[in-house]
Image (cartoon, rainbow, N blue to C red):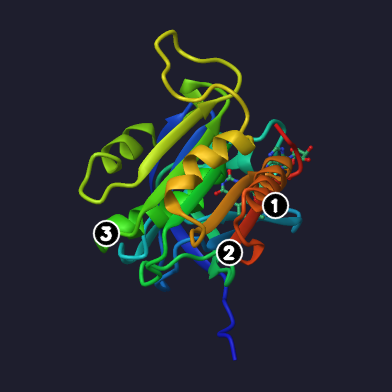
Amino acid sequence: MKPTLNWQIASITNIKPETADVKTFTLKLPAWMRHRAGQHYDIRLTAEDGYQTQRSYSIASEPEREGEVDLTVERVQDGEVSSYLHDVVIPGDRLEVRGPIGGYFIWEASITDPLLLVAGGSGVVPLMAMLRHRAAVRANNPTALLYSSRSFKDVIYYDELHQLSQANAAPQVFHTLTRSQPADWKGYARRIDEAMLREVAGPLGRSAQVFICGPTLMVESAANALVKIGINSNQIRTERFGPTGG
Ligand SMILES: Cc1cc2nc3c(=O)[nH]c(=O)nc-3n(C[C@H](O)[C@H](O)[C@H](O)COP(=O)(O)OP(=O)(O)OC[C@H]3O[C@@H](n4cnc5c(N)ncnc54)[C@H](O)[C@@H]3O)c2cc1C
């Protein structure tokens, strides 16, 4: 039987701006439980009149970090919970949370197959937990991340991804910028498509385990393209963050 996850009160110990619209919140958890890379927490807000609302946020940090987790949240325009987290919450505040949750969109370093990660926007968050986990345990399975952002200033974790890509048995990191690119940009400059996936996934071979996360339309089109280029659909796991295709 699965353990019941109770709500607990986390303390916000740090808030780090990642981009203009994205912040990472460090939550200290009195009932911390080791998570698996790819899982998420639910945050529940309660108004003074008793109105409650809750949303899911992927864990960005690696399972090896004890007692706390990082959640990286993108501000959604007029978003009830993401705007509250961005505009109201400050270090020292307390938040009601429950987790870790999820048993499907999960990668463990004991899986030695090649690993292909495909992200759109804040969909990079659970994939970052996988890369951090991979680095923490010094896994050396062939790994590539293909990460689509609107523009260079929207890329989350750019410096850390660059550092990770320089390490031993490094993951290959490919960026694509869909709306605007710096003058000297050498990465891709269009939405993720079949040709791009063929280039990135090809060297990993047909046995690659695939995780795709981001806006719904991007996730669906990337998954379909990967099946077309010969990856078995049962090797592809997807997670959809939101309703838009943006
Ligand atoms: C398993 C899971 C993990 C998630 N992990 C993360 C994470 O790590 N980081 C993160 O930033 N978000 C994550 N999300 C999305 C998050 O749960 C919320 O949906 C998001 O923050 C919007 O909530 P809100 O209350 O701010 O907006 P709402 O008040 O719910 O929505 C406001 C408006 O924005 C639209 N909208 C809602 N969500 C999105 C979206 N994601 N993109 C674009 N438009 C949207 C709605 O249709 C509505 O018009 C995750 C979702 C799931 C299901």
Other-residue count near label 1 (Cα within 10 Å), few / some / many at <14 / 14–19 / ≥20:
few
Q: Looking at this view, is 120 or 125 the one in front?
A: 120
Residue 155 percent location from the top left of the image: 47, 30
Other-residue count near label 3 (Cα within 10 Å), few / some / many at <14 / 14–19 / ≥20:
some
Tell me: 205 left or right of 179.
Answer: left
Numbered label attached to residue 235: 2
Q: Quadrant of residue 198?
A: top right
Question: Which residue is tagged 1?
Answer: 47
Q: Nearer the viewer, mark 1 or mark 3?
A: 3
**N-terminal of the two: label 1 or label 2?**
1
Question: Which residue is tagged 3?
Answer: 136
Whether residue 146 is situated above or below residue 48 in the rendered picture: above
Whether residue 111 is situated above or below residue 168 in the rendered picture: below
Secondary structure state at the residue bearing disc 1: loop
Q: Looking at this view, is 76 or 28 the one in front?
A: 76
Inter-mark Cα distance, 3 to 2: 24 Å
Rendered residue at 58%/25% (across/down):
150
Q: Are marks 1 and 2 in contact (CB under 8 Å)?
A: no
Q: Let me know if residue 46 appears in the view.
A: yes
Whether residue 202 is situated above or below residue 94 in the rendered picture: above
Q: Are marks 3 and 2 in contact (CB under 8 Å)?
A: no
Ligand 1 shown in quarter:
top right
Inter-mark Cα distance, 1 to 3: 39 Å
Residue 186 percent location from the top left of the image: 41, 19
